[in-house]
Amino acid sequence: MNPLRSLLVKTNLLKSYKVIYNIRKYVSSNNSLLQKDQKNVYLVDENDNSDHEINIAAFNKFTNRSFTCGELNTEHIGLRVSMCGWLEFHRMGKFLVLRDGYGQTQFLIENNSELAKKLAQIPFESILKIEGTVVARPADMINRKQATGEIEVLVKSLEVLNECKSQLPFNIREFQKAKESLRMQYRYLDMRFPEMQRNLRVRSKMLKNMREFLVDDCGFVDVETPTLFKATPGGAQEFVVPTRFPGQFYSLVQSPQQFKQMLMAGGIDRYFQIARCYRDETSRPDRQPEFTQLDIEMSFTSMEGIMKLTEELLQYSWPSFLDPIPRRFNRKSFKEVFEIYGTDKPDLRYDFKIRDCTEFLESNDAYAGCLVFHKPLGNLTKSVRERLNINQFPGTKMIMKKIKYKDDFAESCAKILTREVGEKIFDKCELKEDSIVFLVFGEKNNALKRLGKLRTDFVDHLEECGHKIKKAGMHFMWIVDFPLFEEEDGKLCSVHHPFTSPNYEDLHLIRTNPLQVRSQSYDLILNGNEIAGGSIRVHNADLQKELLSLLDIKTDSLMHMLDMLSLGCPPHGGIAIGLDRLLSLLLHTKSIRDVIAFPKTFDGKDPLSGAPNVIGEADKKLYHIKSIE
Amino acid sequence: MNPLRSLLVKTNLLKSYKVIYNIRKYVSSNNSLLQKDQKNVYLVDENDNSDHEINIAAFNKFTNRSFTCGELNTEHIGLRVSMCGWLEFHRMGKFLVLRDGYGQTQFLIENNSELAKKLAQIPFESILKIEGTVVARPADMINRKQATGEIEVLVKSLEVLNECKSQLPFNIREFQKAKESLRMQYRYLDMRFPEMQRNLRVRSKMLKNMREFLVDDCGFVDVETPTLFKATPGGAQEFVVPTRFPGQFYSLVQSPQQFKQMLMAGGIDRYFQIARCYRDETSRPDRQPEFTQLDIEMSFTSMEGIMKLTEELLQYSWPSFLDPIPRRFNRKSFKEVFEIYGTDKPDLRYDFKIRDCTEFLESNDAYAGCLVFHKPLGNLTKSVRERLNINQFPGTKMIMKKIKYKDDFAESCAKILTREVGEKIFDKCELKEDSIVFLVFGEKNNALKRLGKLRTDFVDHLEECGHKIKKAGMHFMWIVDFPLFEEEDGKLCSVHHPFTSPNYEDLHLIRTNPLQVRSQSYDLILNGNEIAGGSIRVHNADLQKELLSLLDIKTDSLMHMLDMLSLGCPPHGGIAIGLDRLLSLLLHTKSIRDVIAFPKTFDGKDPLSGAPNVIGEADKKLYHIKSIE
């Protein structure tokens, strides 16, 4: 017996169906609801007719229905109910199924030819209100797969609240799912499918839990920051918004980075926001022009503090219908992870680590690495070879081979390297008959990247062929010790952003060997995707100036940041969690669009409303702009 | 004894300082925290060294401090503490005050000339970390006004984490508050004042409570809707965002109205969002180009349902340090309220109702109304008369008078009306010596508006003169039964918006007498401000088409809405609460800018970053626009 129920039994409060019914409902909810409702249950008194509404489920308050279509079961038999929803289906003028966002309920019209005739005239997807009585289904009609499958409702009255007047562009049937473009154009129809209902409802619940953890358990302050801002030097392409001042534009923020740092300087020492961000990255697949991140910043903390907070936050807010996640996540340095997986966001649902074979090369400056798949996993047919042999990685060469006999591999190597190298690698990697091996050599960085891409591409290929390679579950890892800078066209760039703090141990290298300087940053990866990233920020104005100068970023546009750092700014750091991606991963959707209520297409269009659109000349005049080709 | 504590005492769990300390803290928080922490307290075990961290306050988790500067009191005496904050003040190389977002704490340097010398060199507003021991203040040094005024901390070590390197543009002293423009330019300094700390923290807490109520208590789903949208016909001036498609623009949403209606058609039957909205209304004072509203929509509900929900929501989320608000708010029809107060947002902190005196006029089509202030309240000096006599109301005339003797008023009336009218009004309004009376007559609508403006202007004048007219507290009222249409330049316009449902009782008047049709809408006013407004929406496609045609709005740009209504849309309605305004009213701030972290000036500029700003030619080329004068 659950604790609440046992408490009520002891205290003699458990007297009526009303109370029992409520307890059942609360117990099926999460703990916080249980506590909240514990308070309410104490208020219950069968003879009290005031409007406590304790007997109305949360989601039925303030409405004209007494139950949703997903709520009734054998405990409700005999109850007079009032329900609203879509007419999903009817047959024989007798049975009908009503659907809403919570589920489906079957209704039965008994010996009432008037109602039956009426029903036959109503188009599917019309909105009905039905009153009736809950009865048990005959034993042979019970549907165990359906939450409401043990009952049906005898129809007493039936009212059409809104008739579906047009032909539906697609039916609301699981097995008839429409193309995505049509689903987006009629998003409100797409949402009637249980999957979209689940996605949006889980999203809401998870965000609620995140807020609860941050505010109640950790004392964070939720602060809304502006989205109409000024262009940030470097970073993504930003949307612009013309104003009534000729030639002057806002830029839509790509993240609240500057604002959250200012909040730290302002004494809001624990800030979070579920923030809308904007990036105009139409060329990148599965991105949205506007997206949501959980943005967090804290003063007087450390990498350790932020990582621990993030772990506890995810644990607290993780949906209860999924397997729990570990209390702490593994950590690896960027260097280590890159050398093992050829990427900084390895998919840890499968092993297949890169074996360093550089020792066998004669040349001193080259690198060689191998990926080996020991189990006999398909063949390297011509089309597979072609798919895997795309070389975007200058300065690298590859040998790919399915081993047929012992000397096979050495022979292949002989053509490009030497026979001996092949033999040594054969031994080191313990190759055997049917092993598939990818050997990449040349410039180290690119060779590793190529191996990283081969690793995921070959596994994807194997999965497509029906091999189950990826383990189930959620595989998290922190990647730390990133380099602070990288080089692009001979110039230093930030690996994260210009406000990221160097690792203080490497400060002495900043002028002499900047590429060796590690940053105080951390990325969180989940099943091969970066879902969060953050850093300890620079809080010292002089250091920030030096970094900007190394990065060749002019200080004029960032004077407000430098002022802020020089007027008493606490040391601080934070993280941003990509919520669209996180939800998409944990709900196993094909695209982030499936966890967004009204997404745009890959090129930023909204098929529903037709945005973007032409605007009037008056608007252009007001904002001092002219359209050009 | 509070219930939690008594429970713990009974169950023998209350054994240690650790627990007592925590209880004290939880009890000082609100009920929801108490419940949550009740769970935690059960976990406490003095001998358990795992990382439950039950002895660390929420806001100190994951940081390098053990206490904030607002936390210590006599219960902590003897504790070794570690604290971080701004050096607010030091004197005699001995005392120093550290400040953070939670309060101030006094530190004492005892017989340590090294530390004293160091302290003397540190500029105010530098960020320090201090370790030390809590001691009681000498009896004559106790400051009862300060939360931490009974203790001080003996400094053991002191570290400068970040020196304040520049001259402060203004000091962080209550009595030296800077001009608003400077406060906005250095917003992060302005935030260090206790008032801004309180405003932002109360805002966060209130929004958290609203979400808690809606999700946990009412089963609402928090859905994020796009801000990059399409121009909405009618309504406010919308910002536009050029895209990579020549001549095509997004518009920034002025409200999620269309999206929330689509959610209803999609089965998310209880939606809310704390939504960012955009309106380019630079000419209106105390508005922001981007602002926040709590946006709510429900299916299968009624005006009654939404109003009740709103009342319970406000009651639940109302800050506990304020007086509680009534469970239900009074309601009045638009017609009644307009005739009594000359406005649809009357300030109910004072009475002064308009008395209808039309009966005494000879002309049939004119209106006369009086406002009377009986108590002797100041004089109608020339400057007051000038201030009050601004006539923006065509077709109206005014007599304003302070009564000196009985026939005084009749004499004044004789000049424009007749003596008899004056006498009758004198009697009806029970005028007497020293009464101040405003009589306005002429076109009814404008006369009432003029009286409404006189009512607030004269009360504002009296308050400025030191009369206390406005009652304290929060005075709510629902205004209902608005007309659906109003006439502007001979054309019908929506009083709310084109999706507002007519009152079904008046449907027969829609073609014949549209101005007489009432809508199913409701505004909530608080102390003379509209803080929320909403309506039951049109859910029938044919009715919506008819309304759009009456309003002369082309249907092309709203086809997606008409489609949506015709494909099975539930009856629905909702409300939007203006959070910036609500917070400003309940925190008694001068402007909504004081409850917004980073507000813009009245003309949409951000003095902090300098937005808006010129953008590069590359951006303009990418977005196919040219700037013109």
Image (tube, coloured by chain):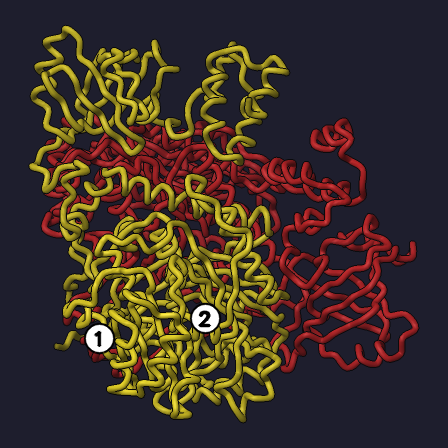
Chain colours: A yellow, B red
**Horizontal side of residue B492 vs B366, given as left or right:** left
Q: Is residue A229 left or right of residue B504?
A: right
Relative to residue A560, is residue B111 drawn left or right? right
Q: Which mark is residue A467?
A: none
Q: Is residue A249 above or below residue B143?
A: below
Residue A503 falls in which quadrant of the image? bottom right
> Does dot 1 land on a helix, a strand or a loop?
loop
Q: Quadrant of the N terminus of chain B?
A: top right
Please determine whether, in this image, residue B232 is positioned above or below residue B449. below
Mark toward the start of the polypeptide (2 vs 1)? 2
Same chain, labels 2 and 1: yes
Q: Amino acid at mark 2?
A: Val
Q: Is residue A221 above or below residue A318?
A: below
The disc placed on residue A337 is: 2
Chain of the residue under label 2: A
On the image, the x and y values in percent for residue A20 come to 49, 17
> In which quadrant of the rendered image does the C terminus of chain B lie?
bottom left
For the question of whether residue B361 can be seen, the reply is no
Mark 2 neighbour class, 10 Å CA radius: few under 14, some 14 to 19, many 20 or more: some
What label sits on residue A389 in the rendered view? 1
Image-quadrant location for residue B502: top left
Q: Which of the 4 image quarters holds residue A592?
A: bottom left
Q: Secondary structure at mark 2?
A: helix
